[in-house]
Amino acid sequence: DWPLISNLELRARVTSVPAARKHAVAATVQWNLPKLSDDVELVVSELVTNAVEASLATWKVLGACPLPVRLWLASDREAVLVQVWDSSPELPAPRNARPEDERGRGLILVDHMRSAWGTYRKGIGKVVWVVV
């Protein structure tokens, strides 16, 4: 049961990531979970960044206007469930980033910070979820 709920719809733009982080921090503070704030902020940042990139990549292939990215947060007053939807049907997979790579570590980082995570298809896209 997740009685505390907050959501945000974002444009598929890189500038949406800071707005998602601020929203996540505000929700955790409002829910009196400041000890989870930093971890939730980092998870939201990684997931929304990936969702924006996936939506923009889908847009380039299809030539259509990118659909929004959706962020849902929920809490049972002890943990926070983060869910992010994007319009790409491709499910995420952790990469084997080399030390010199600037990208490719987000899901590995999320995997170490969570109690559970996964994905599921929803509509034309997918949802990536993490419990912090």
Image (spheres, rainbow, N blue to C red):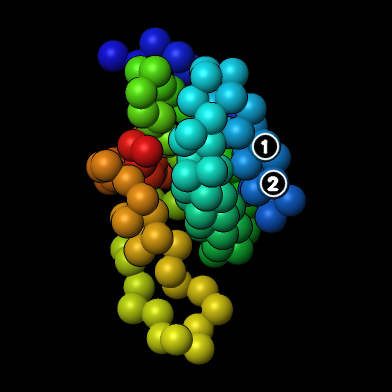
Which SS class for mark 1? helix
Q: Nearer the viewer, residue 32 or 26?
A: 32
The residue under the point 69% across, 46% down is 18
5 vs 124, nearest the viewer = 5
Q: Is residue 22 above or below residue 15?
A: above
Residue 15 shown left or right of residue 8 in the figure: right
**Is there any visible trace of residue 93 in the rendered image?**
yes
| Res. 22 mark | 1
Q: Amino acid at mark 1?
A: Lys
Residue 58: x and y in percent read: 52, 58
Q: Residue at x 59, y 18 (%)?
A: 30
Residue 28 in the image, given as x and y percentages of width and height: 54, 27
User: Are discs 2 and 1 less than 8 Å apart at CB?
Assistant: yes
The circle on residue 18 is: 2
Residue at 50% across / 88% down in the picture? 100
User: In the image as oriented, which residue stretches furthest toward the front?
Assistant: 35
